[in-house]
């Protein structure tokens, strides 16, 4: 059974919602990637999403863009990230997922990417610039592994698209909470999001997680009643970069505490 | 290969393996709507009437096909003709596309547009049609390009557009496209993206090609009227590739006509400081399309270098990528230095100051013409006028360049 499916099964049994922590692979170097993953695991993150830096990240806001540039300056590549994850797989108990724009994967080689991701025990992949129409590019190679291809749903996705991406969905569906790019926001329109996620949930039993713009327990509290978990990125990337690790710990504890009461 | 019934792109927006729609889900609905709107609105009589009437009375089409007698004599060999896109309103071919897309956006009920610009020509052409059609325009432009094209920035502002300086990445055209795409994602409900070249996700490369193909259509008829045949060679410069695609498209099935695209070799193709994506790049995905790109081993996009800001883009549109692999179009490159010589050559020989972009096409065409017999013919797409470049030319003459 895929590690993500196992994780969601356990969470459901315990009446918990998922906390997914996003970090930028290679921001601060490869050693920090290892320590950050283990720190997040200790702090109670259910799933850890590792970003692969790309020179032109059109779905990302300034915090993740800058983290990506820092990582690239340190010489980060898919190859290095997969090697590093492979080295620490014995210590990692939570499912790891990769989030990468498609071009670095294409240049690395899709078959090789699938094989080495499987070796590093990656549970799922998110390709932010690979909509359903183009998914076949990676599907064949990844279907030979146990790695889930995690799809994104948007507030702008009409009924037909939601149905299409719900069908055969794997791992979880990443519901983008805002029309916009990644980054912290003071507010979000929970009503519009609730309608979208509720509709999506009529088409599939695959868990739906909300991400983009969620940075505080109060924002998480607004969305957790109608989704299966949240993904927090920019806030964590920024806290790690400024060496405010305790803030990350508090954030996870804060949101997990909410999640437990949101059953 | 034979291209007697050329029909690209296919229903998935692909040109062979190239093209496609590699964009975030948030943009997919807008792109699908655009495709539907384009397929239903653009062919309708009402749209075409308005578009054709504005092309004629506002843009000033058709543009002349001019026999450059003195240039031909100086060069020796083939007869050289110039398709005078520099005589369009705003001074370049860009307005053929911005006018078409703005009219389309308006009919889709979108009254705001966003665009990227490199040299500023596409930005000016966008700001111009937005003034004409009473639409709001936001233009993203790299900080570096703002520095080297100040006059165009001011023109855009005079026309009522908001110009946003892009300070991310290399601060040039590529980063302006990134920011324009991010802005579009954020303002998707009421905003249309006017893509400036044959780039981006389907249907943009097709829409831009179709609106620009007026260049090739006119050229074909005009040349036939004078010479009673088709030209032997057609030459155009390539940044993203819109003037070339508009020029080449109507000739694709006429296989006796050799089509040549000229990329910017910058300081030299071996130096690493160039913008020759087809000559030196590798296939990859950027800004929504699979195409040839300048990139590292790891798939990180590299900076392009050219003395001409309009060619300073690290990729070439998917249809050009396809036409190269199929062998229908030949792609070559010329250096900054060669383009500068061609700039001076045309200016003195014909009293026409060409854009530095177009000077790349001229440079290759005169090399080619010298080797050809006198009964052969070359048409150059003179994509824009050079007024915007005089400052760069002056600096180059003084031994400085904008790169330094």
Image: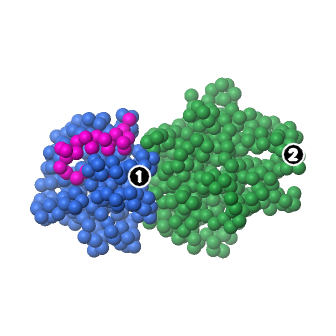
> Splitting the image into 4 quarters, where does residue A52 fall?
top left
Q: Relative to B83, does residue A237 appear above or below in the rendering?
A: above
Q: Is residue A249 left or right of residue A177?
A: left
**Residue B197 x %, y %:** 59, 53
**Residue B92 x %, y %:** 68, 50
Q: Are discs 1 and 2 less than 8 Å apart at CB?
A: no
Residue A101 visible? The answer is: no
**Residue at position x 37%, y 50% from top?**
A113
**Residue at position x 57%, y 34% from top?**
B273
Q: Which mark is residue B373?
A: 2
Residue A13 visible? The answer is: yes
**Residue B240 x %, y %:** 59, 49
Closer to us: B263 or B192: B263
Q: How is the image coloured?
A: by chain
- Classed neighbour count for the residue bearing mark 1: other residues with Cα under 10 Å, few (<14), some (14–19), many (≥20): some
Give the residues in magenta: A75-98
Q: Colour of chain B?
A: green
Q: Colour of chain A?
A: blue
Mark 2 belongs to chain: B
Mark 1 belongs to chain: A
**Residue A205 x %, y %:** 25, 70
Of the 4 image quadrants, the one containing the C terminus of chain B is top right
Q: Is residue B277 left or right of residue B69?
A: left
Q: Is residue A92 magenta?
A: yes
Mark count:
2
Q: Which mark is residue A110?
A: 1
- CA distance for labels 1 and 2: 50 Å
């Amino acid at each position: 059974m895929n590690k993500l499916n196992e994780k969601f099964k356990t969470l459901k049994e315990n009446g918990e919602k998922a906390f997914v922590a996003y970090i930028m692979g290679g921001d601060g170097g490869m050693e920090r990637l290892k320590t950050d993953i283990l720190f997040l695991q200790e702090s109670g993150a259910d799933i850890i999403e590792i970003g692969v830096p790309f020179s032109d990240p059109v779905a990302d806001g300034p915090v993740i863009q800058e983290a990506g540039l820092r990582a690239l300056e340190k010489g980060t590549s898919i190859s290095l990230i997969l090697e590093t994850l492979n080295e620490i797989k014995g210590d990692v108990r939570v499912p790891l997922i990769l989030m990468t724009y498609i071009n670095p994967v294409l240049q690395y080689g899709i078959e090789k990417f699938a094989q080495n991701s499987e070796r590093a025990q990656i549970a799922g992949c998110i390709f932010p610039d690979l909509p359903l129409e183009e998914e076949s590019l990676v599907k064949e190679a990844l279907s030979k592994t146990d790695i889930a291809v995690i799809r994104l749903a948007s507030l702008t996705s009409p009924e037909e698209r939601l149905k299409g991406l719900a069908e055969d969905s794997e791992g979880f569906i990443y519901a983008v909470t805002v029309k916009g790019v990644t980054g912290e926001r003071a507010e979000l329109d929970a009503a519009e999001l609730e309608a979208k996620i509720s509709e999506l949930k009529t088409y599939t039993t695959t868990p739906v997680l909300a991400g983009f713009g969620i940075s505080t327990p109060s924002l998480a509290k607004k969305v957790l009643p109608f989704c299966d978990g949240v993904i927090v990125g920019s806030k964590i990337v920024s806290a790690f970069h400024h060496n405010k690790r305790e803030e990350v710990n508090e954030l996870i504890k804060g949101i997990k505490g909410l999640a437990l009461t949101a059953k | 290969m034979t291209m007697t019934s050329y029909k690209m792109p296919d229903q998935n927006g692909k040109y062979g393996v190239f093209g496609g729609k590699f964009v975030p889900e948030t943009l997919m609905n807008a792109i699908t709507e655009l495709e539907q709107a384009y397929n239903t609105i653009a062919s309708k009589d009402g749209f075409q009437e308005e578009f054709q009437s504005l092309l004629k009375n506002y843009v000033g089409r058709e543009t002349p096909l001019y026999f450059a007698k003195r240039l031909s004599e100086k060069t020796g060999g083939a007869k050289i003709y110039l398709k005078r896109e520099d005589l369009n309103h705003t001074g370049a071919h860009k307005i053929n596309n911005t006018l078409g897309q703005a009219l389309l956006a308006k009919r889709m009920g979108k009254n705001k547009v966003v665009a990227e610009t490199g040299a500023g020509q596409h930005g000016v052409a966008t700001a111009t049609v937005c003034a004409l059609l009473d639409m709001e325009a936001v233009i993203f432009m790299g900080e570096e390009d703002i520095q080297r094209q100040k006059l165009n920035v001011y023109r855009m502002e005079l026309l009522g557009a908001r110009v946003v300086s892009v300070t991310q990445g290399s601060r040039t055209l590529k980063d302006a496209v990134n920011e324009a795409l991010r802005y579009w994602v954020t303002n998707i409900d009421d905003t249309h993206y006017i893509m400036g070249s044959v780039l981006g996700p389907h249907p943009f490369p097709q829409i831009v090609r179709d609106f620009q193909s007026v260049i090739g259509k006119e050229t074909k008829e005009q040349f036939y009227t004078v010479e009673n045949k088709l030209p032997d060679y057609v030459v155009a410069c390539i940044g993203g590739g819109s003037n070339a695609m508009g020029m080449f498209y109507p000739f694709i099935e006429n296989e006796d006509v050799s089509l040549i695209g000229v990329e910017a070799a910058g300081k030299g193709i071996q130096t690493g400081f160039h913008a020759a994506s087809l000559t030196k790049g590798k296939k990859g995905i950027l800004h929504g399309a699979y195409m040839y790109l300048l990139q590292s081993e790891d798939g990180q996009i590299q900076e392009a270098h050219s003395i001409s800001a309009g060619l300073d883009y690290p990729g070439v549109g998917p249809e050009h990528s396809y036409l190269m692999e199929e062998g229908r179009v030949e792609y070559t490159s010329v250096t900054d230095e060669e383009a500068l010589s061609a700039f001076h050559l045309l200016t003195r020989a014909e009293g026409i100051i060409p854009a530095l972009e177009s000077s790349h096409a001229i440079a290759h065409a005169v090399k080619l013409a010298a080797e050809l017999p006198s009964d052969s013919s070359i048409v150059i797409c003179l994509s824009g006028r050079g007024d915007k470049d005089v400052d760069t030319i002056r600096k180059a003459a003084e031994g400085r360049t904008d790169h330094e």
